[in-house]
Each structure stands twice: as structure tokens, then as C-alpha cells.
Image (cartoon, helix red, strand yellow):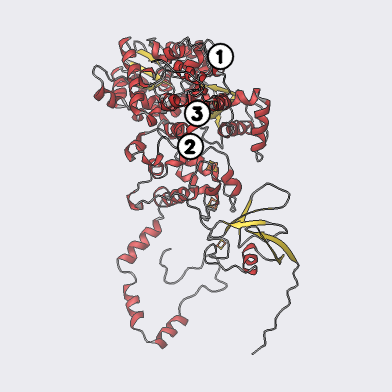
């Protein structure tokens, strides 16, 4: 066994303010790691640590400026004299609906989220969005009933909720956008024909036999079958087709 | 109905606030009643616009708060284009609405609009209605 | 001359018939236009508080977009949008202090000084096309149609953005006359339909709308021409309620004026989108034998 040696931390320590209290943290850390370095333990406000779950939205301000900036704690590197706090949750309204009962009409979105019409186009939402989504634009699209455009503009949204925290119309933008994307996916985008055929084939029992076979196979036979499976050769080229072409 | 005036009944604050928010000088009103005669909502409101101006001049806060005038006003601007004193009465009505709305009080609840009505209403009705009647 | 076109939210859904017919008319009259590529709701009502600038951001942002688009004129169809954009424009033109504050607030946008001209379809046709040219393009005159043009509020008031004389306008009548209609003038043509009070005081709005319709009918109108989706809702789509509540009210067919213009100019009926009008309106137009003439 190789011995693990403690590595000396060489990074410079810089002062940051977490919820108004000063801490010295290594300058190379992300806000999230800096918060942990300072001794906090995450129970909420942290999820994927990879910039996709939207749990770690953070607002901060740098010295000498009134500007409120935003970022994801897991992605943003600390800067000297940063004032910051996380906003792990925002109590924005979220309507409940039975998705299967919707038909994809704009009026259904209006009915679930009347607040939509309170937007004043101040653009505070787009300015705060850590994903650079043009939030105001997707709200504008929804007001005119363009669900498809809203779904496309909001595609990068990770549901962090920062937009709602800044909204002077008190809109839950991200929840409305999520509804738009769902409707777009289910009702407005044409269904893939090959997928439909495949699902029908599976339901008709295309894999029933081989699945039952696998279930009763002994372990050695399973291993053998696995090794012998058909694989795309490294030199396969673009027009390689598997012997058992399932049609996808 | 006679209006009683005394130092006690005159609220200087509401007079100042309305002036500030509306930017209009209701003091210029000489009570000709053209506004009341022009108002399409005249038979739906409890206090006619001419009288609202008088109540403002006298600082009658309670009477103004009790009136439904500014909540029924549709901002149609008929009185505005006809007022011989050039007072923007619609702005005065707006300031009276703002006195309530700015306390974070809503007059209608958007979420309570029925599904049936939402299916029929043009967006412009909701945009304008929420602007005028929610805080 | 090419102009920018600002639709407004309702014209993309409930009032598609206003948009599609108007654009078809512009095509028929040889007007070149381009829809604003990026626009937001104008807010529908102009801010009436002296100290409230935040509600001016929406219309000003749209005007900035027009500037970015490279046009000097923006055409509106919905009269609420017209009013909001035109009033915001006036303010940006004339109030240096507020203009500065608004421009500072929108630090992500270029500055705006009120250089764009905001027009409504009606005054645009009057000033840029002219009644004579409009008349010359009529293929299918609305002969014998006793039509009451209804202005409503926001095209005429307040005075600084009125497309005509606030208290005695003629532009709408002249336009419909050029299309061959027999004009029914009635006093309430410039009065309010109840506007947003359909949400706050629906009964009060119903009452004033009913007054407008009964007066127009009493003056001999058999149909009404409109410019605004909110008027269309209050006066048109709420007629069923009126008929139930008020004795003596008769159903009155309602059209966007651009639909009637499209009929008169003989453009493809597909652009009328008549299915968005009430049944009584559709039947009325069929009864006039105007549609058949177009399709032949
Ligand atoms: S749109 Fe709103 S919820 Fe989505 S990522 Fe941007 S700020 Fe977060
Ligand atoms: S923050 Fe709210 S009011 Fe402002 S533009 Fe975004 S959605 Fe509209
Ligand atoms: S923890 Fe998931 S985005 Fe930061």
C-alpha cells in the first residue's frame, strides 16, 4: 500500500464574507468549498456539485459596487472581499396539474399561472440568471402564447429560482418555463416515428424470449454471453450496422 | 349631503400624497362638474369625480377611502380631455388606487379567475387588470 | 418606405383575426413591414403615477428594439398597445429627467430619446396611403352595410397621442366610408367599453358595453367595427351575458375594422380568420353575400 502524504496547502488565503461574517479561505476554492472550509456543513443548498441541479444558487456583491451578482456556489470561484449568501430555496408559487389532462393550449398555462401577466419587463430576471437564460424573453413569449419559443429560450434553465427572487411582478418564472417545456415536449414537438415503432415492438414481446432466457441463465453462461456480445469495432466507420439491427 | 369641515376633518397627508403621486393640482378644480357629466361609470360609482375633487380639497380621507370611485374608474380619460381646468383626473384616480396598492394590498386575486374565464379572456384584459388592481 | 410592426400579445392568440386581416391589407396596399424580431408585452396601460417609472420600462424597451431594427416608424394594431407605446414615446421625447432615469435603469440597452414614430393602422392609412388610394383598391365595396365604427378610449385620449380630434374624430368613419360602408355615427362611439373593469367590476363593464350596443342599434347600426381586442371582448364576446341580463338588447355583429377592410380589398378569405368572431358576426357577413364575391 502506498502511503498517502498530507499535502501542504499553498493557495493564498483571501477574506470573504459569508452571510456578513468574515472568513479567510484559499483563493482557489469555489464558493461551495469555501463555505465548507469555513466550517459550515451542507444539509440543503447543495446537490450535484457539478452545475446542473440548481440547488446552490448564490448571490454576492463585490466591494465598491452596488451590483448584486449571482452564480452557482459549486461553479463560482471566490474573490477577495466577496459578500455572499446562498438562496437555497425561494417560496415561489408552483401550481399543481395533471399533465395528462392538459392539451397544450396557451390558456392552460395562463390558467395555472395568471401571475404571468404581471411581468413589467424590468429584465431583473435575465440579469440574475446564472445560466444566462433570457428569462424576460421567455416570459414575453409565454404572454403571447408561444409555448414553443418559451421552451426553447428556457432550455438551459436549471430551476435554481434566482429569477423569482428578483421579480417585481412576483412571478415563478422557472416553474412556468418548466410547464412550457413539458407541454412542448409532449404536445408540440412531433413524435419520433421510429421510437413509436420500437415501443410497439417491445410491447408486442420483441424481447420477451431473450429476457426470460437471461433470467434462467447460470452465471458462467451469462459471462460468456456478455463477452461474446456484438460490439461496434473501433474501426467500424460511420456506416457500420449491427447484425441484429433493431432499427433505432 | 352636507360636508362638515373643520381642522379635525382635514387630512393634510392624503392631500400631499395625492399631489405627489399624481403630479396634479386638484386645488385648481372649480367644481363645474364636467367630469361627472362625462364619466361613463357615473351610475356605478358612489361618489362622482367632481365630489372626489372636493373631498380632496378638503382632505376628507375617510370619505375618499369609502368611495368606490377609483376602483370602478376605467381610466378612460373622458374627464381628462374635457376638464376646463386642465386637471388630469385619471391621474388623481390612479394616485388614490396607489395609496392602497402600495401597501401590498390586492383588489382582485389573479389566481381566483376561473378556468372558464381564463379560456375566454384576451391577454390584454389580464395585463391591464392586474396592472390596475393588484399591487 | 418600410416600417416596423409591433403586434402585441393578444394578436397572437385571441385576436389573430385582427393581425392576419391587417397584414393582408398591408400586402394588398403595397406597404412593406417587418415584425419586430424581439418584443415584449407593452404593459397595456400607461403608468399614470408621476413617480412610477418602472411601468414605462416595457414600452420603452420595445421602442429601443425598433431602433435596433433600423426603422423610424412602428405600426400598431391594438389600440391599447398604441396608446401605451405612444405615450411612453412622448415622455421619452419630452421629459429629460425621466428619460435619463429610465435609460440609466436599462443599463443593458442602448439609450433612447424618443426618435421613433408610433402610429396606429388607422392614422397610418390616412396619412401614408390616403383615402383616395384606399378607395381605388376596393374590389368588393361594403355597399349597404350600416356600420357603426367604435373608437373606444385609447386611440383618442389623452389629447397628445390622439390620432384625431379627441372629442370629434372622423378618421374611423372616413376609413370605413372609403370601403363603401354606410356610416352610422353615434355619440357613444368614443365612450369606454369598461376596459379592464371586466376583471374588477364585470357587471359595471357589462352595463356600459350594453349601453354602447343599444345606442348603436338605436341609431340604425347593423354591425360594429372595432380596433381593440379588449373592446371586442367586452362588446362582442360578452353579448351573450347582455342578452340574458338586459331586456331589449339585440345581438350586434362585431368585426375588427381590418377584417372589413380585407373583405373590401378582396384579399384571400383565409386571412379574415372569421372563426374567431362570434357566430352572429359570421352569419351577418355571409348574409351580405360579400364572401362569395371574394372567392369568385
Ligand atoms: S431561468 Fe431562473 S430558475 Fe432557471 S436557471 Fe435562470 S435564474 Fe435559475
Ligand atoms: S423579473 Fe419578473 S417582472 Fe422583471 S422581467 Fe423578469 S419576469 Fe418580468
Ligand atoms: S450543487 Fe448542483 S448546481 Fe451547484
Q: Residue at x 66, y 33 (%)?
A: C101
Q: Is residue C90 left or right of residue B113?
A: right
The chain ID associated with circle 3 is C
Which of the numbered marks, if any, corresponds to residue B28? 1
Pointer 2: residues within 10 angstroms few (<14), some, or many (20+)?
some
Q: Secondary structure at mark 2?
A: loop
Between A41 and A26, the one lying in front of the other is A41
* N-term mark: 2 or 1: 1
Q: Secondary structure at mark 3?
A: loop
Image depth: mark 2 or mark 3 in front:
2
**Pointer 2 and pointer 3 on the same chain:** no
Marks 3,1: beta carbons within 8 A: no
Point out residue B95 in the picture as x, y percentages from the top left corner.
Answer: 51, 27
The chain ID associated with circle 1 is B
Which of the numbered marks, if any, corresponds to residue C45? 3
Q: CA distance from mark 2 to mark 3?
A: 15 Å
Q: Quadrant of residue C97?
A: top right
Image depth: mark 2 or mark 1 in front:
1
Q: Residue at x 65, y 64 (%)?
A: A30
Point out residue A72 in the picture as x, y percentages from the top left corner.
Answer: 60, 58
Quadrant of the image containing the C terminus of chain C? top left
Between B105 and B62, the one lying in front of the other is B62
Q: CA distance from mark 2 to mark 1?
A: 30 Å
Point out residue A121 in the picture as x, y percentages from the top left corner.
Answer: 55, 38
Q: Secondary structure at mark 1?
A: helix
Residue tagged 2: B135
Point out residue C26 in the picture as x, y percentages from the top left corner.
Answer: 50, 23
Amino acid at each position: 500500500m502506498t502511503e498517502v502524504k498530507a499535502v501542504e496547502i499553498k493557495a493564498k488565503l483571501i477574506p470573504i464574507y459569508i452571510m456578513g461574517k468574515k472568513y479567510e479561505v484559499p483563493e482557489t476554492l469555489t464558493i461551495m468549498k469555501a463555505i465548507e472550509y469555513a466550517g459550515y456543513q451542507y444539509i440543503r443548498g447543495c446537490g450535484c456539485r457539478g452545475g446542473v441541479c440548481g440547488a446552490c444558487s448564490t448571490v454576492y456583491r463585490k466591494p465598491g459596487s452596488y451590483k448584486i451578482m449571482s452564480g452557482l456556489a459549486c461553479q463560482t470561484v471566490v474573490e477577495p472581499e466577496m459578500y455572499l449568501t446562498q438562496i437555497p430555496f425561494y417560496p415561489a408559487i408552483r401550481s399543481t396539474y395533471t399533465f395528462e389532462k392538459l392539451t397544450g393550449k396557451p390558456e392552460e398555462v395562463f390558467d395555472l399561472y395568471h401571475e404571468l401577466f404581471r411581468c413589467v419587463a424590468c429584465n431583473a430576471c435575465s440579469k440574475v440568471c446564472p445560466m444566462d437564460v433570457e428569462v424576460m424573453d421567455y416570459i414575453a413569449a409565454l404572454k403571447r402564447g408561444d409555448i414553443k419559443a418559451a421552451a426553447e429560450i428556457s432550455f438551459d434553465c436549471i430551476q435554481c429560482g434566482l429569477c423569482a427572487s428578483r421579480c417585481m411582478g412576483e412571478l415563478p418564472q422557472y416553474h412556468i418555463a418548466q410547464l412550457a417545456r413539458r407541454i412542448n415536449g409532449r404536445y408540440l414537438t412531433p413524435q419520433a416515428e421510429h421510437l413509436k415503432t420500437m415501443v410497439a415492438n417491445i410491447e408486442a414481446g420483441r424481447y420477451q424470449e431473450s429476457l426470460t432466457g437471461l433470467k434462467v441463465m447460470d452465471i458462467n453462461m451469462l459471462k460468456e454471453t456478455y463477452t461474446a456480445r456484438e460490439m461496434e469495432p473501433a474501426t467500424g466507420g460511420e456506416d457500420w450496422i449491427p447484425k441484429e439491427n433493431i432499427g433505432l | 349631503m352636507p360636508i362638515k369641515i373643520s381642522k379635525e376633518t382635514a387630512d393634510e397627508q392624503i392631500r400631499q400624497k395625492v399631489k405627489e403621486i399624481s403630479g396634479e393640482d386638484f386645488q385648481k378644480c372649480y367644481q363645474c362638474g364636467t367630469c361627472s357629466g362625462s364619466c361613463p361609470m357615473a351610475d356605478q360609482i358612489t361618489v362622482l369625480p367632481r365630489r372626489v375633487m372636493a373631498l380632496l380639497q378638503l382632505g376628507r380621507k375617510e370619505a375618499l377611502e369609502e368611495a368606490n370611485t377609483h376602483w370602478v374608474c376605467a381610466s378612460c380619460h373622458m374627464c381628462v380631455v374635457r376638464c376646463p381646468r386642465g386637471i388630469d383626473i385619471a391621474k388623481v384616480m390612479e394616485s388614490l388606487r396607489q395609496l392602497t396598492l402600495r401597501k401590498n394590498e390586492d383588489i382582485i386575486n389573479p389566481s381566483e379567475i376561473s378556468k372558464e374565464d381564463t379560456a375566454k379572456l384576451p391577454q390584454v384584459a389580464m395585463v391591464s387588470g392586474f396592472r390596475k388592481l393588484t399591487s | 418606405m418600410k416600417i416596423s410592426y409591433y403586434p402585441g400579445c393578444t394578436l397572437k392568440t385571441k385576436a389573430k383575426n385582427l393581425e392576419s386581416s391587417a397584414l393582408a391589407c398591408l400586402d394588398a396596399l403595397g406597404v412593406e413591414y417587418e415584425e419586430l424580431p424581439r418584443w415584449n408585452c407593452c404593459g397595456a396601460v400607461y403608468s399614470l403615477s408621476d413617480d412610477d417609472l418602472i411601468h414605462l420600462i416595457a414600452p420603452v424597451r420595445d421602442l429601443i428594439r425598433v431602433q435596433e431594427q433600423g426603422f423610424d416608424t412602428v405600426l400598431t394594431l391594438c389600440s391599447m398597445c398604441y396608446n401605451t407605446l405612444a405615450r411612453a414615446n412622448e415622455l421619452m421625447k419630452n421629459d429629460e429627467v425621466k428619460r435619463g432615469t429610465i435609460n440609466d435603469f436599462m443599463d443593458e440597452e442602448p439609450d433612447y430619446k424618443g426618435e421613433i414614430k408610433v402610429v396606429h393602422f388607422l392614422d397610418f392609412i390616412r396619412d401614408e396611403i390616403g383615402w383616395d388610394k384606399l378607395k381605388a383598391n376596393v374590389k368588393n365595396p361594403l355597399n349597404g352595410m350600416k356600420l357603426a365604427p367604435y373608437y373606444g378610449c385609447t386611440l383618442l385620449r389623452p389629447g397628445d397621442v390622439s390620432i384625431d380630434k379627441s372629442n370629434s374624430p372622423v378618421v374611423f368613419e372616413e376609413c370605413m366610408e372609403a370601403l363603401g360602408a354606410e356610416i352610422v355615427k353615434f355619440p357613444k362611439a368614443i365612450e369606454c367599453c369598461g376596459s379592464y373593469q371586466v376583471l374588477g367590476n364585470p357587471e359595471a363593464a357589462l352595463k356600459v358595453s350594453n349601453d354602447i350596443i343599444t345606442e348603436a342599434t338605436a341609431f340604425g347600426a347593423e354591425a360594429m367595427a372595432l380596433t381593440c381586442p379588449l373592446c371586442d371582448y367586452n362588446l362582442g364576446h360578452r353579448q351573450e351575458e347582455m342578452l340574458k341580463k338586459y331586456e331589449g338588447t339585440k345581438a350586434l355583429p362585431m368585426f375588427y375594422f381590418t377584417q372589413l377592410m380585407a373583405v373590401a380589398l378582396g384579399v384571400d378569405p383565409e386571412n379574415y380568420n372569421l372563426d374567431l368572431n362570434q357566430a352572429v358576426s359570421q352569419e351577418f357577413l355571409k348574409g351580405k353575400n360579400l364572401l362569395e364575391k371574394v372567392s369568385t
